Image (cartoon, coloured by chain):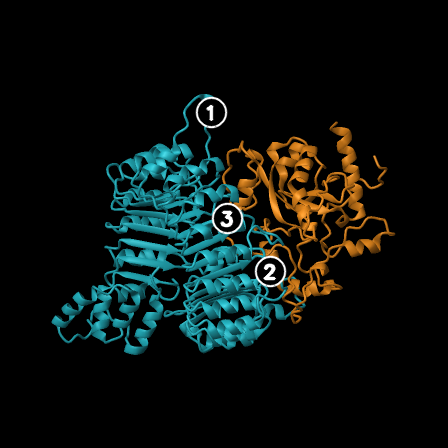
Amino acid sequence: MEGCPISRETCPKLLDLIPQERKWYHDKEKNNSDQEKKLELRLAPPGGDEEDLSAMKKKKNLETRNNIKKEAEDKPIFNLSGNHFSPSNKTTYAPPHISHKRTAPGPVVGWPPVRSFRKNLASSSSSKLGNDQINKSGEGEKQVEPKREGMFVKINMDSVPIGRKVDLNAYSTYEQLSLAVDKLFRGLLAAQRDTSGGEGEEQPIIGLLNGKGEFTLTYEDNEGDKMLVGDVPWQMFVSSVKRLRVIKSSEISSALKCKLLCSYGNMFYSHN
Amino acid sequence: MAEEEDLSEMTNDVERHLKLDPPKPSSSPPCPSHVLENVLENVLKFLTTRRDRNAVSLVSRSWHHVEAQTRFEVFIGNCYSLSPARLTRRFTRVRSLFLKGKPRFADFNLMPPDWGAQFAPWVAATARAYPWLEKVSLKRMFVSDDDLALLAVSFPGFKELVLLCCEGFGTSGVAVVANKCRQLKVLDLIESEVTDDEVDWISCFPEGETHLESLSFDCVESPINFKALEGLVVRSPCLKKLRTNRFVSLEELHTLMVRAPQLTSLGTGAFSSTHDGAQGEQEPDYASAFRACRSLVCLSGFRELTAEYLPAISPVCANLTSLNFSYANISPDVFKPIIRNCHNIRVFWALDSICDEGLQAVAETCKELRELRIFPFDPSEDSEGPVSGLGLQAISEGCKKLESILYFCQRMTNVAVTAMSENCPQLTVFRLCIMGRHRPDHVTGKPMDDGFGAIVKNCKKLTRLAVSGLLTDQAFSLIGEYGKLIRTLSVAFAGDSDMGLRYILEGCPKLEKLEIRDSPFGDVGLRSGMHRYNDMRFVWMSSCRLSRGACRDIAHTLPSVVVEAFGSDDDDDDDDEDDNADYVETLYMYRSLDGPRKDAPKFVTIL
């Protein structure tokens, strides 16, 4: 093990960087706090304060309070690179300041305006799992027969606009999955990065599971939590994963990197 | 669908022009001569459109009376705009009734359950007044099993039941209709919530030949008795439309198709096989079953699709005019070979999984396309997505006859939207949903004002518009100015200030239905429409900036407009904020001839 002093329980889950009741989940390391702050994801405008959020929340609390259960599937999505509130994505247009406009991302009732029977498509066709399946629609949909054919989940990668799908039934270990991800995205990533228009050299995507590579593989489970891939036994992962995301390792705070290293170590020792 | 002019608006006109009092049951209206009445009756029978009939009814009292006697189809766009009693008083020989209940935003959980729109009072009134009622179509109404039972026993000649986006009933109600309506031709359950009462309703159809022409139950989320269904299909020689649910397997579908090759419209169930090759049994030849259905022009369903079976539909592709893939996660590679044969498609629905690439293929092949709907496979807000302005632009360049589009995407450009406005002059419906809230043009970073502005300027036939993305008040100025024929407008997360709403209400002369959510429009904007609300069917505003005072003012100034407020949290813990009690979370107001409804639940305040 890496001698990480922090136990698994106190390490925050990946991407719990969104403030919950305005508390950041910090570890005890103070020396990195400044750098961490820069890397932390904010939902307010740059330099924005949380007071703004609370003012709007007063108006929003009705929706979120009344309907947070119903809209459990409208979870905050992976906001890392797609968040148009983040400084890096700030456009040249600056609208007049209207506090209402910068609504807090999070479950929004009835948005996008898709009727609930259409929302079930993603959960019913991406993971056919038999009796363990938890249907998030809240409509008490009947159990579906386990699908023996593919178990496809969507996978996106930072800085690559095109998402792909992987068939998790085709693999039985994290290593295999990691190799598949490399195969899927290596070309696309190279295409994104090539600015000169010529043939760029394709770099293999490695280190997805141990925090050592440029990218790290994460996933969203059936409860909407964002997790590092590799934590749990493979079958448990397959039964709870809803979608995958390959994020830049630099986006993870050092506390979580530690968890990565711990978990990888564990996995290495217990499953080999 | 034919132009809607609903009963309340028309009756409004009548009341104003003719100053009619509701006729007393015993007296008959004044009429110059019997001869004239008979002549008129025979002439008016030729008038079928609502607008013609509404115009005719304004000529004089006798014309009004005769028209009322000869109107067989009644359309009511808002069930609360008039009472059932008024309907039965005015029209005495109704054969067909179309009722709409809840407003559209109720589909997205923006309306608390048990809000209303009960069918019960309507079925009770019509059961007494129209024994010869043949057809009932309901949209977004609450229909109970008892209502269905009453319907089934009250109308001996009942022929058609269509339930769109309804709820409140289950398979037991359906069973009663199946069993008691011996003349039934159409039983269409579409996008409705049907509870599973564990009743074998298919077996409840009576023995012997049926008159069934259309049977749709794809929204029924419970298994059915397949043997009974097969038997029903066999004894329904007139059956043309059959839409099964996902509990019907591909093998079972094959059986049905072989039994009913005369079908014109087919909704498949699960399009995947449980066939176990190891058994040694031959898998059915699906392609030849499709080939045998020579009249098939409409295909839908494809739930739980296994891509390898999709090519089985190839034999019918060239004849298809309508194709619905919106429940199937189909990749471009699987999609393209199929769509290449569909030259006659006019209506196409799909998921965005076909990508811009798939849309390109549609554009190259489907030159007759009139209606396109692209739904999101993964309806979340994301920066990426499989379809974009590229797909939209491709469609506009290939499908010049396009009239109606609904397009969900994650990102869009003004250039693409403008291109569509220029390439598709026949557009009457333009609904673009950029799923990221307040998202600007992803190439230029500017608001989407220019794109939507081009749509209202160039698409001169536009009657329905839904906007999205980052929009300033300027966009609404253009909509108000150029949207001369717009009747329905949907706005979400858009605009800067009250001016946005003012532009709409002071422009858009034909506006009837306005639905707005999460936009910074307040009392000033609301008040600016005071002169219009009597002439509109409804206005919905939720999560805007309205206060109770302004809503009350509307209610007091316009007695024929019912103003409902709900959703404000009365047991808010933040007692320190007094304005919170004044804040109106949701405003739903509509014109009504019979005043506020009596069945409003507690959480609804009628101002």
Horizontal side, residue B23 vs residue B105: left or right: left
Whether marks 3 and 2 lie on the same chain: yes
The one of A127 and B162 positioned closer to us in this rendering: A127
Is residue B112 visible in the rendered structure shown here? no
| Amino acid, disc 1 | Gly
x and y, in percent, of residue A211 in the image: 77, 41
Q: Which residue is mark 1?
A: B277
Rendered residue at 16%/65% (across/down): B42
Mark 1 and mark 2 on one chain? yes
- Report crowding for label 1: few under 14, some 14 to 19, many 20 or more residues within 10 A (C-alpha): few
- The residue wearing badge 2 is B437
As drawn, the residue found furthest toward the front would be A198
In primary-sequence order, the first of circles 1 and 2 is: 1
Closer to the camera, B247 or B320? B320
Q: Residue at x 34, y 73 (%)?
A: B12
Where is residue B290 shown, x and y percent of the image? Answer: 36, 37
Task: Determine the chain carrying the residue at label 3.
Answer: B
User: Where does the N terminus of chain B fall, quadrant-wise?
Assistant: bottom left
x and y percent of residue B50 in the render?
Answer: 30, 66
Asked where in the image residue B209 lies, by quadrant, the reply is top left
Task: Say which residue label 3 marks.
Answer: B358
The quadrant holding residue B519 is bottom right
Q: CA distance from mark 3 to mark 1?
A: 32 Å
Mark 1 secondary-structure assignment: helix
As helix, strand or loop, the secondary structure at mark 2 comes to loop
Chain B display color: cyan
- In the picture, measured across the screen, residue B153 lies left or right of residue A39, that is left
Identify the amino acid type marked 2: Arg
Q: Is residue B319 above or below residue A112?
A: above
